[in-house]
Image: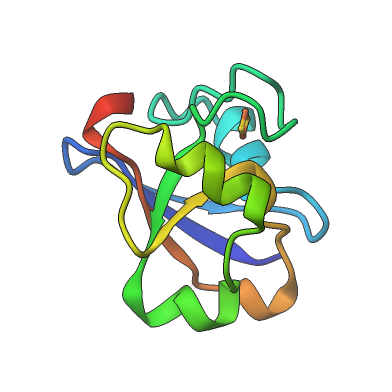
Amino acid sequence: MPQITYIEANGAEYEIDVPVGNSVMQGAVDNMIDGILAECGGACACATCHCYVDENWTAKVGPASDIEKEMLEATPDPRDNSRLSCQIEVTEELDGLIVRLPESQY
Ligand code: FES
């Protein structure tokens, strides 16, 4: 099972095995990681699952869709490597992925 590392704004790190086909958001919610709130349940409508994809992984994860980009612009601190974690599907290729969670979700 792919392992995803979540790093909260306070530096707390969690290495979680997330099933293929789940979203990166679901992996955090299932393991009670506070830095991902996911208020809309994964519908790309709340942006409380905002994460920063580690620079070494942005190419593999790929870019945000246009709708996702609009949502990200409404977050407090969007960056080039911002994604909504509910829109990242976990695949075997993402084994080892590192995402950091924004200060605003801490
Ligand atoms: S969970 Fe609401 S946008 Fe991702």
| Viewer-closest of 86 and 72 | 72
Residue drawn at point x = 51 percent, y = 82 percent: 59
Q: Residue furthest top?
A: 39
Determine if residue 86 is in view.
yes
Residue positioned most to the left: 10
Of 72 and 8, nearer the camera is 72
Residue 27 placement, left or right of 103: right
Instruction: Please tell me which residue is depicted at 64% across the width and 30% down the height of the picture.
Output: 30
Residue 49: % across, % down: 51, 34
Q: Quadrant of the C terminus?
A: top left
Q: Position of residue 11 (x, y in %)?
A: 18, 43
Quadrant observed for ligand 1 in the rendered image: top right
Q: Nearer the viewer, residue 31 or 43?
A: 43
Residue 4: percent from left, percent from top:
52, 59
Above or below, comparing residue 61 to residue 15 in the picture: below
Residue 57 placement, left or right of 104: right
